[in-house]
Image (cartoon, helix red, strand yellow):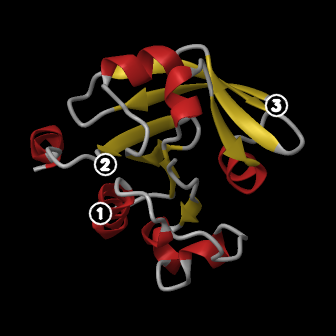
Amino acid sequence: MPVSINVIIFPAVFHTSMHEIAGEAAAEDVSDSEDPCSQYISAAYQRAKAFTYENPFFIRVMQSSYVSSNSLTIPRVIGWEFFSAKRSDLVLQVPSKRSWALKCNRAKEYAKLTSGWKEFVLDNNIKAGDVCVFEQVNRSNLLFSVYIFPAEEDSVNRLEQYD
């Protein structure tokens, strides 16, 4: 089972530990698992971390529950940073410029991306173990560029969209 890693990065403070920025202890590491699939997850996570981002972003390792449900749960430390209102409309956009309208519901301990999340997952063939980076390119309109780093051995074809 993939390890859930929640990271928030602000490029201006990139030198700071990602887990410190996220307000979390560095207790989880995708490479520490004995699961044979973890090497692919770890590689996908390393590719996501190595990519260059110009705006604030957060990283989520997709769990099976995220790709099979109608919502993506985001921990409070991230949700409250990116979504100031209890209910927000947002847009997720992939590098091909295709976009999906979603809703975000922010609660006390977490935020959830809903109403469109399932379509986004299906349309982009997101699987458990894939790593998604959500880069906030427009704060006022809540527009996020999403970069998907597959955690599978034959992921080269799915990564070509970022070349």
Disc 2 marks which residue?
151
Where 96 sits versus 84, above or below?
above
Disc 3 marks which residue?
86
User: How many residues crowd mark 1 within 10 Å: few (<14), some (14–19), many (20+)?
Assistant: many
Nearer the camera: disc 3 or disc 2: 2
- Report the amino acid beneath label 1: Ala
Residue 11 x, y percent position in the rendering: 46, 70
Q: Is residue 52 visible?
A: no
Q: Nearer the viewer, residue 147 or 85?
A: 147
Label pair 2/1, CB-CB below 8 angstroms? yes
Residue 65 x, y percent position in the rendering: 59, 31
- Report the amino acid beneath label 2: Ala
Q: Disc 3 versus disc 2: distance between alpha carbons?
A: 32 Å
Helix, strand or loop at disc 2? loop
Where 10 sits versus 63, above or below?
below
Disc 1 marks which residue?
43
Q: Disc 2 versus disc 1: distance between alpha carbons?
A: 7 Å
Residue occupying image coordinates x 52% and y 22%: 68
Q: Residue furthest bottom?
A: 15
Of labels 3 and 1, earlier in sequence is 1
Nearer the camera: disc 3 or disc 1: 1
